[in-house]
Amino acid sequence: MISASGLTKSYGATRAVDDLSFDVRAGVVTGFLGPNGSGKSTTMRMVMGLDLPDAGTVTIDGHRFHDLRWPLREVGALLEAKAIHPGRSAYNHLLAMAQTNSIPRARVDEVLGLVGLDGVARRKAGKFSLGMSQRLGIASALLGDPGVLLFDEPINGLDPEGILWVRTLLKGLAGEGRTIFVSSHLMSEMALTATDLVVIGRGRLIADTTVDDFIASNTVATVLVRSPAADRLAAELRSHGAGVTTRDDGALLVTGLAAAAIGDRSLAAGLPLHELSPVQASLEEVFMDLTSDMVDYHGHSPVQVGS
């Protein structure tokens, strides 16, 4: 388990992390979300003892990282895929790490096979693509077979097969009871991979909850309704307190009544129904709505030539 309490970190006049508290529990994948510049990488660096907080504490299973006797056996991390000596082979990179933590040499071959790099193990890491570097970084994190794992944007540079592999790997590791803390800008992937979420903006906590609760607590339950008698059905539903919006295609978006109640009202009024579907907001939609005023740099619509 990772536990942060009151974490604060500034660089000069910039407050990167501001009184941040959260827990990352074992046995599930916890997604770490926030706009660029929100403090995610700084937070992960403080977990790993690479940056010292100005205030607050962060512990791993009750201990600070610096107090761990064999760090690589207890915590694995991929924070920067290219943080590898370019002239060293993948095998020698992992071997050097293994020898400093009394990890058997056989484990090097094992993790290289696990991440699919056994065929290029003797190639210099400086020649690796970003995707291959990501796989080597994952191998480094797994080398000590730790119970706690942190991954900062682990799917950058990976093809669809690689993304699916990482998703399956993370879920499998969590299923073994490990603590998995992973950041990503791909909301669709987090929706498929994570069970829990820690969401921050401008260094402050926005949410520490499950994916389902995050979406449900920040959206209004809506039902999509289609009927050849849409106008009459809309009037009927409004008379029972529902909010009804008519889309351009004639479908109704109904709030304030559950799908079953809408069906009952339609039946009682003798009005036909062709569709009755709960509308589920996506993780991306909720995230973008909650963090829209916390983004430092906004794009603009392109200017049309000749306008």
Image: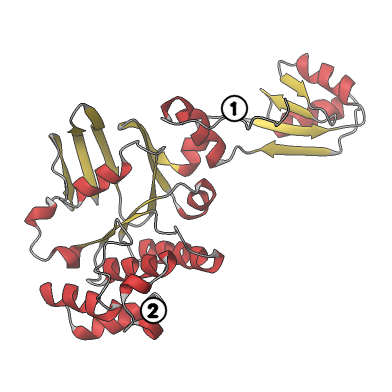
- At mark 2, the secondary structure is loop
Q: Position of residue 21 (x, y in %)?
A: 25, 35
Does residue 157 appear left or right of residue 232 in this picture?
left
Does residue 288 appear left or right of residue 19 in this picture?
right
Asked if one can make out residue 15 in the rendered structure from this viewpoint, the answer is yes
Q: Which mark is residue 192?
A: none
Q: CA distance from mark 1 to mark 2?
A: 47 Å
Q: Position of residue 290 (x, y in %)?
A: 47, 29
- For the residue pair 180 and 112, the one nearer the viewer reads as 112
Does residue 146 appear left or right of residue 224 in this picture?
left
Asked if one can make out residue 216 in the rendered structure from this viewpoint, the answer is no
Residue at x-position 47% and y-position 43%: 211
Q: Nearer the viewer, mark 1 or mark 2?
A: 2
Residue at x-position 52% and y-position 29%: 289
Does residue 84 appear left or right of residue 218 in this picture?
left
Residue at x-position 10% and y-position 59%: 68
The amino acid type of the residue labelled 1 equals: Val
Crowding near pointer 2: few (<14 within 10 Å), some, many (20+)? many
Q: Earlier in the sequence, mark 1 or mark 2?
A: 2
Q: Is residue 298 above or below residue 41?
A: above
Residue 116's quadrant in the figure? bottom left
Q: How is the image coloured?
A: secondary structure
Q: Which residue is mark 1?
A: 220
Q: Is residue 37 above or below residue 85?
A: above
- At mark 1, the secondary structure is loop
The amino acid type of the residue labelled 2 equals: Leu
Q: Which residue is mark 2?
A: 117
